[in-house]
Image (cartoon, grey):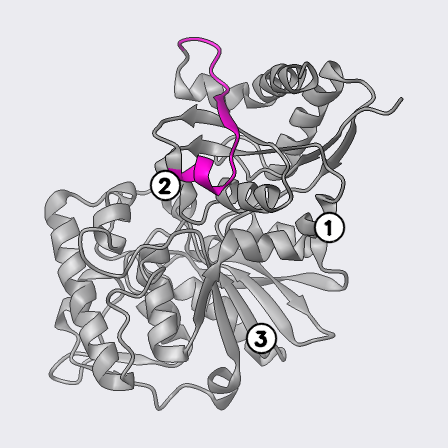
Amino acid sequence: MTGPRVVVAPDSFKGSVSAPEVCAAVEAGVLRAVPGADVAAVPMADGGEGTLDCFLRARAGSVAVEVRATDPAGRPVDARYALSGDDGSAVVELAAASGLPLVEDLPPDPLSSGSAGTGELIADAVRRGARDVLVCVGGSASTDGGAGLLRALGFRFLDASGAELPPGGAALARLARIDGSGVPAAVRAARFRVACDVTNPLVGPDGAAAVFGPQKGASPAQVRELDAALAVFADVVAAHTGVRVHDLPGAGAAGGACGGLAGLLGAVPADGAALVADAVGLPAALAGADLVITGEGRVDAQSAAGKVVSAVAALAKERGIPCVALAGGVAGPLDGLHALGLTAAFSLADGPRALAELKAEAAPLLAAVAEQAVRLFAAR
């Protein structure tokens, strides 16, 4: 007699294990609990790190293109994006060229860090024929409203004297005019979408600077400075295009890069985890499933706002399938996730442990927790 069908669809545990590694560890635990289980592994992402690899695995014919780009501190970095020659589409992961891990060797510089490298990847993709560009934002090192990446695509950001602003979010406080005359026609003609992992607006108490600035090393005073600068940026974008991005849901993603792309290139924000779920075939994989196991590094109230756990739980709920999340840390309340369809969440911590220890032993801990969760499920 065959065992239950278990679909494993997690995000990566950042700084610890990749999504495929999470799948392998969870599968090992599931099979310890029920040796006859049918386990389907569907690695996921939400628009942040790891999204590019998900698309490369899922899209037949896509190739990884490596480009010498600029990191958030202005140094050269080799970064990849995905290009599909058959339909002229590209997938660019912002973290590849503009991610926070790229500058972990330097003191935090939240005021001056830029996103130019991502624009260089996009420009290369358009030059190679991409007409549909999906920009996966998340893990950004900067809070520059995407001005750096837009500058790499031909926009100029000028102060009152007509001088071009330097990189970084703080300089946007002096922005007076945007010059788009140098943007190539191919960029103007391309369709842009942004895969977001958050729904935060560009400015205000829930905006890019206030919520994510401290993660990039911004002090309270620097958060206020960046928020004010982004407000100026949004005002000038509105004057230039007539598009208001101040309170656009998702505009605050990746230091406001989503807002800049939406305001100046008409990019459409989309739920990153939902886009990935469709691309990797998760809806089809759920057919006939008895249990879904998802997870990410931390599960808390914010996980309900566009993270992988929320997307997977929602799909499971639509099909009446129990859904369990495993995470390095779990912090309630989780009412939002439960309403979306999450049955329960379990932490990997089996006792008092340092974060570094949890990260180092994530794989065996995942297997152990998965085994216990499935034993409980099988005992129903």
Mark 1 crowd level (few <14, some 14–19, many ≥20, 10 Å Cα): few
Distance Cα–Cα, label 3 vs label 2: 30 Å
- According to the picture, the residue beneath numbered tag 2 turns out to be 302
Q: Which residues are magenta?
A: 336-352
Q: Position of residue 176 (x, y in %)?
A: 15, 80
Labels 3 & 2 near each other (Cβ < 8 A):
no
- According to the picture, the residue beneath numbered tag 3 turns out to be 132
* Residue type, numbered disc 1: Ala
**For residue 375, side relative to residue 297 (left or right):** right
Residue 39 painted magenta:
no
Distance Cα–Cα, label 1 vs label 3: 25 Å
Q: Position of residue 311 (x, y in %)?
A: 53, 47
In which quadrant of the rendered image does the N terminus lie? Answer: top right
SS label for mark 1:
helix
Q: Considering only order in the chain, which callout, 2 or 3, is on the residue closer to the N terminus?
A: 3
Q: Which is closer to the viewer, label 1 or label 3?
A: 1
* Residue type, numbered disc 2: Gln
Mark 2 crowd level (few <14, some 14–19, many ≥20, 10 Å Cα): some
> For residue 240, which quarter of the picture?
bottom left
* Residue type, numbered disc 3: Asp
Q: Which is closer to the viewer, label 2 or label 1?
A: 1
Most foreground residue, 231 or 16: 231
Given the current orientation, which residue lies at the most extreme right position?
Answer: 1
Q: Position of residue 47 (x, y in %)?
A: 50, 53
**For residue 224, side relative to residue 368 (left or right):** left
Most foreground residue, 283 or 174: 283
Q: How many circles with numbers are drawn on the protein?
A: 3
Given the current orientation, which residue lies at the most extreme top position?
Answer: 351
In which quadrant of the rendered image does the C terminus lie? Answer: top right
Labels 1 & 3 near each other (Cβ < 8 A):
no
- According to the picture, the residue beneath numbered tag 1 turns out to be 284
> For residue 148, which quarter of the picture?
bottom left
